[in-house]
Image: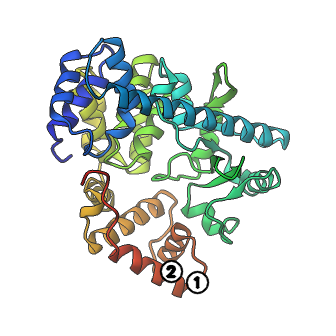
Amino acid sequence: MKPLPPSTQALLQAVLPSEIDRQALERWLATTNLERLEPGQFHLLPLVYRQMEQTAVNHPWLPRLKGIHRRTWVSNQLAVRAARETLDLLAAADIPALLIGAVALALTVYADPTTRPIGAPQVLTRTSDRLAAIQTLTAGGWQPSPPTNALTAPCYERWQAGHLFTKRLSENEALQVRLCWHAAPSGPIPAWGAQWFNRSAPLTGESLQARTLDPTDQLFQSLASAPALELIPLVDGQQLINRHPIDWTRFVRLAKDSRLTLMLRERLALMQTMSASQLPDRVLTELNHAISPDYADEAWRLDQLNPWERTAWQRFRLSYALFRQRAAAQGVAPYPGAFYDYLRTQMGTNSLAETLKRGLRRMTASPPLPHGY
């Protein structure tokens, strides 16, 4: 893993341990420019605000962080409402579903759910129920976003883990939910679908009742699904480890089967270093000894580059490495036709000409710089 900036190191040392590290929090405040945050830091600001409030750290940023925390509370309320409506629709149609990802984590492992931004809640169905779930949501007033004619095609089931649906509440407000049929986008192994449901655990809260992944599967899904520059999965993982017993034998097996051992080993090692917690010795040893294919290594390495710093060739290599990763997980030979289907579903295109045009535009256009850069 590439070296972390001092600001990011201080932030992780502040938020990962089970007890608030006031000195690390003050180091973060001293080394950080709020107008130019390092990648991955923004989603941790609601948690930082709560820590500053609890430790009585007085700082000029406090009002701004309070505003970010307030906006997170508002958006999380809408996210929970979207999840509840989606689960109710699917239950009425006798379609089993699990609540996964950020919404499940916010409601189960965070002492204060408002400190964990949810975004669009993720609802997982079995792949065999995918078409019925899409039809049910559409009939209930939810629309695919963006619209695509390929949503019900078999290749969409293979190469996409899910799709975003939107339901308008007013001209300026909408609910969003991501309907998923693969819990782990980077390792969509078909045989895992039944395991997620068979091992699921109840999620009971004031706002909704549902079922979610068991803690070991939640840990794997959280660490394996997020982009390399995201920091909040590390906090999710540490919260899970602190609060629940983890079946490390199963976790290592999932890592090996998905060919994600390098990514997971480096993330767990970073969590252990920054939180001063101790994982079972054998976990990192087994992950270190596991064979990691070249495409998985390349995907992890390129994903750690800032998006606006990647060259056109690096963007293509990252896309192809991720395709190889998903193809291997499903036992699909990485032939050009399969790569075309993968690109078509990623871009939402319906023809070769449209796919080439949009692909070239994505490779050659520089992504926008984040605020302050």
Amino acid at circle 2: Thr
Considering every residue shown, the one lying at the far bottom of the view is 353
Give the total number of marks visible in the rendering.
2
Image vertical order of residue 42 relative to residue 206, above or below: below
What residue is rendered at 79% in x and 56% in y? 135
**Residue 224 shows in the view:** yes
Secondary structure under tag 2 reads helix
Left or right of 65 in this view: 186: right
Residue beneath label 2, please?
355
Residue beneath label 1, please?
351
Secondary structure under tag 1 reads loop
**Residue 213 shows in the view:** no
Q: Is there CB contact under 8 Å for labels 1 and 2? A: yes
Question: Of residues 80 and 63, which is closer to you in this image?
Answer: 63
x and y percentages locating residue 116 in the rendered image:
46, 30
What residue is rendered at 75% in x and 58% in y? 131
Q: Quadrant of residue 319?
A: bottom left
